[in-house]
């Protein structure tokens, strides 16, 4: 078992470059290795793939992965290939010769992971074909597609139980991000899973900071947000196709690099947009909810909901597309009564049964409660999905900046009194106009400029009135009558405020940006980070285009962030970066080091970066200077330069150490070193030497000896 444990971690670092497992992964992997069935429910980005990919590499034989979307499948295959894994795919979008190629590899047992589309595995005779090979594990990705209850039902998935029945002794693992109990049960039943253990991870997405703002001046707010997030990729979700096009056009003319996407576009147009986004050529997309399923872009840094979605399921799934690489991401939701009303009309006008409509109305209400909440938003969503907890999440706006409520009884009295004096016959907008004393024609014609509270709220801006009234609605002091043109009505609580001295607390929502980044270090350092990040991204984008793969297949943003944070200048430090595995290191390590070194050496004012001084020496050595010349040029002692050479050599940099110390000298040092029981300090070694050497030579010799021992 200890060996197994060691192997798991070794593979994790070698192939994926990671040193620890994410929550839940290890338990699932152990279950799979024990050849038992599992059902894994993990949020998007939780790290499901590793749960079958890692065991696949540890078990004898080949793992079959069934995955519904060819584009996703191709990306996964590309990513694994680039990490040095023997992997292939079989689906209907391949040429005959590509398929023959895969068959040849299979016959030679050269495949550890085989991705297959459900149509393909269900095709006649295919399981017989597979049965000829040794199969270690069968993984069913997006397993909720088996369930008719969900939106993603695929008839081909229903047939998969036949595969299960055919390979009864092979462990099955079904994976999905869809949580609800009905779907879980359905998956287990339909796929004939054998006493599966069900692993359910928390659906909290800790790396996503959620935020919700009233939609006032949302265009301006959006532009500010886009400026602040500079080059980061994102999605702006809009409610209608028309809006995606209009907003995108407006933002393009404002100088942003974006495009739009909706289901009304031709498949060719759609895949073009998707591809450009995936390759980081388009920074963000204004899209309807049609955009999502099928994009596997792990470096989406933000999602804006330009309007409120119709339910929390959709919302959570959409924001979940950001930050799949685990790096910080932001989700900004704009909400307004306008959205609410529109969404409600959609339900009203739909052909659905009354029963179905009732459920949809309730879901919409929960969405509204979420959007306008003053307490921890994450808890609200988690509770909605049945994961009850109360501790604050610390990554939503309400946790980061707890809203401060104030006594707003007078404000409430003005609004409530105006509603009554307007005979409960005004909409929210008209009410605000009355409170603010607008002489609009409609108001004069209705005689509303004559009532007592006309102009009583001049000192409060339109936006703030809207925010206050929204809160009064949420607290039950006002009701919106959907059956009467969305007019505002009094409730049983109204008179408590107007006549019985009940006080009201309201929250002042500041319209300024959530200042999460306020704690950033000083500007110079920030600039340095950004510059290096830009260089790395440029290189990655070139590589991605050349290899025709999404950028993240080369390296994820998270890896680049780790690099930028540590700025490794020598090989061993680079290899220690989280997310850099052996194969990737061998493929790209030198190039990365060249980029980092090149960039760092241009930064005159930067000192104190770990390893910088060694690299300066290294660069001069490569230019052909000798230690004496280097010492002079760098204004350091020669002994220091030799120290650098020893360090570089020990850390696998190419330096010709034998140019500075001879084999005889090394042997002499070695003998003395053994005599003083391998102490690493130079003084004791010197004592055991017959003819003392200069210290710097001893240091070089010692570096040589230790390296030889480690070989
Ligand atoms: P899911 O399929 O659950 O949406 P993925 O399997 O695509 O998620 O993983 C999401 C991201 O998390 C990927 O970028 C993956 O490389 C990364 N990841 C997975 N496991 C780990 C881990 N143990 N340590 C660090 N990153 C991980
Ligand atoms: Zn919170």
Image (cartoon, grey):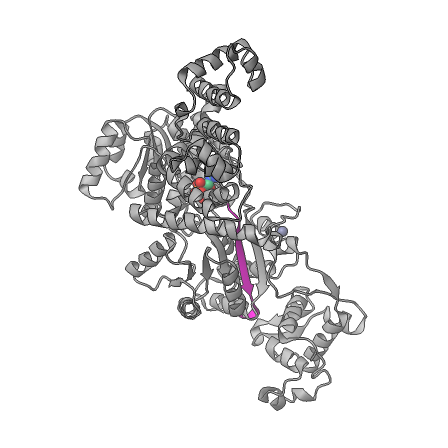
The residue lying toward the viewer, choosing from 481 and 25, is 25
Quarter of the image where one finds residue 340: bottom right
In this view, 87 is above or below 691: below
Q: Is residue 328 magenta?
A: yes
The residue lying toward the viewer, choosing from 658 and 178, is 658
Residue at horizontal 40%, vertical 39%?
Answer: 190
Q: Is residue 255 magenta?
A: no
In this view, 562 is above or below 64: below
Residue at horizontal 40%, vertical 66%?
Answer: 241
Q: Residue furthest right?
A: 501
- Quadrant containing the C terminus is top left
Magenta stretch? 327-338
Query: Looking at the image, can residue 423 be seen?
Result: no
Quarter of the image where one finds residue 494: bottom right
Quarter of the image where one finds residue 164: top left
Q: Estimate the x, y position of residue 26 in percent, counting from the top left.
A: 50, 31
Q: Estimate the x, y position of residue 244 in percent, counting from the top left.
A: 42, 66
Q: Estimate the x, y position of residue 335 in percent, counting from the top left.
A: 56, 65
Residue at horizontal 61%, vertical 64%?
Answer: 512
Query: Looking at the image, can residue 451 be seen?
Result: yes
The residue lying toward the viewer, choosing from 532 and 392, is 532
Q: Residue furthest left?
A: 97
Residue at horizontal 35%, vertical 36%?
Answer: 587
Give the number of callouts: 0
Residue 48 is left or right of residue 79, and the answer is right
Q: Estimate the x, y position of residue 546 in percent, counting from the top left.
A: 29, 47
């Amino acid at each position: 078992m200890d060996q197994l444990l060691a192997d798991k971690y070794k593979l994790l670092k070698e192939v994926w470059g990671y040193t620890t497992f994410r929550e839940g992964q290890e338990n699932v992997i152990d279950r799979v290795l024990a050849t038992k069935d599992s059902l894994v429910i993990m949020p998007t980005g939780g790290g499901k793939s590793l749960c079958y990919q890692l065991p696949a590499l540890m078990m004898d034989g080949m793992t079959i992965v069934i995955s519904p979307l060819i584009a996703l499948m191709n990306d996964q295959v590309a990513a694994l290939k680039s990490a040095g894994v023997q992997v292939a795919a079989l689906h209907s979008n391949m040429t005959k010769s590509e398929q023959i190629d895969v068959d040849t590899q299979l016959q030679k047992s050269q495949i550890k992971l085989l991705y297959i589309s459900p149509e393909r595995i269900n095709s006649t005779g295919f399981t017989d074909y597979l049965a000829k090979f040794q199969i270690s594990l069968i993984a069913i990705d997006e397993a909720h597609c088996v369930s008719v209850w969900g939106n993603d039902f695929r008839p081909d998935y229903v047939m998969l139980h036949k595969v299960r029945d055919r390979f009864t002794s092979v462990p099955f693992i079904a994976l999905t991000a869809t949580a609800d109990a009905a779907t879980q049960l359905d998956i287990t039943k339909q796929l004939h899973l054998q006493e599966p253990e069900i692993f359910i991870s928390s659906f909290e997405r800790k790396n996503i900071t959620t935020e919700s703002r009233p939609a006032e001046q949302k265009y301006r707010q959006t532009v500010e947000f886009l400026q602040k997030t500079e080059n980061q990729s994102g999605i702006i979700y809009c409610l209608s196709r028309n809006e995606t096009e209009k907003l995108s056009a407006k933002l393009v003319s404002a100088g942003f690099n974006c495009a739009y996407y909706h289901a009304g576009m031709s498949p060719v147009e759609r895949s073009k947009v998707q591809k450009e986004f995936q390759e980081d050529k388009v920074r963000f997309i204004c899209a309807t909810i049609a955009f999502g399923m099928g994009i596997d872009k792990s470096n989406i840094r933000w999602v804006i909901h330009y309007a409120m979605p119709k339910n929390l399921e959709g919302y959570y799934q959409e924001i979940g597309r950001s930050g799949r690489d685990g790096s910080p991401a932001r989700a900004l939701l704009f909400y307004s009564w306008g959205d609410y009303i529109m969404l409600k009309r959609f339900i009203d006008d739909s052909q659905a049964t009354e029963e179905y409509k009732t459920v949809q109305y309730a879901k919409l209400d929960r969405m509204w409660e979420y959007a306008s909440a003053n307490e921890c938003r994450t808890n609200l969503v988690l509770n909605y999905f049945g994961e009850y907890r109360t501790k604050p999440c610390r990554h939503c706006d309400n946790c980061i900046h707890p809203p401060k409520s104030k006594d707003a009884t007078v404000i409430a009295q003005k609004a409530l009194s105006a509603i009554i004096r307007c005979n409960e016959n005004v909409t929210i907008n008209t009410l605000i106009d009355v409170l603010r004393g607008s002489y609009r024609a409609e108001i004069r014609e209705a005689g509303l400029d004559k009532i007592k509270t006309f102009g009583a709220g001049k000192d409060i801006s339109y936006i703030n009135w809207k925010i206050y009234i929204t809160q009064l609605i949420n607290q039950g002091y006002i009701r919106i009558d959907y059956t009467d043109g969305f007019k505002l009505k009094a409730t049983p609580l109204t008179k408590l405020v107007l006549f019985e001295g009940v006080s009201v607390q309201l929250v002042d929502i500041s319209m300024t940006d959530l200042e999460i980044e306020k704690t950033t270090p000083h500007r110079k350092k920030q600039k340095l980070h950004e510059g290096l990040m830009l260089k790395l991204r440029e290189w990655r984008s070139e590589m991605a285009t050349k290899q025709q793969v999404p950028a993240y297949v080369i390296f994820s943003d998270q890896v680049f962030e780790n690099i930028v944070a540590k700025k490794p200048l020598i090989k061993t430090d680079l290899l220690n970066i989280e997310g850099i595995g052996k194969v990737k290191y061998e493929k790209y390590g030198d190039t990365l080091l060249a980029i980092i070194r090149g960039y760092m050496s241009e930064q005159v004012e930067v000192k104190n970066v770990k390893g910088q001084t060694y690299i300066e020496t290294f660069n001069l050595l490569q230019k052909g200077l000798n230690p004496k010349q280097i010492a002079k040029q760098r204004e350091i002692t020669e002994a220091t330069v030799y120290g650098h050479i020893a360090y570089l050599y020990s850390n696998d940099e190419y330096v010709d150490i034998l140019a500075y110390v001879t084999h005889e000298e090394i042997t002499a040092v070695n003998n003395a070193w053994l005599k003083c029981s391998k102490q690493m300090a130079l003084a004791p070694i010197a004592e055991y030497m017959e003819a003392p050497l200069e210290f710097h030579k001893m240091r070089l010799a010692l570096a040589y000896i230790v390296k030889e021992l480690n070989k």
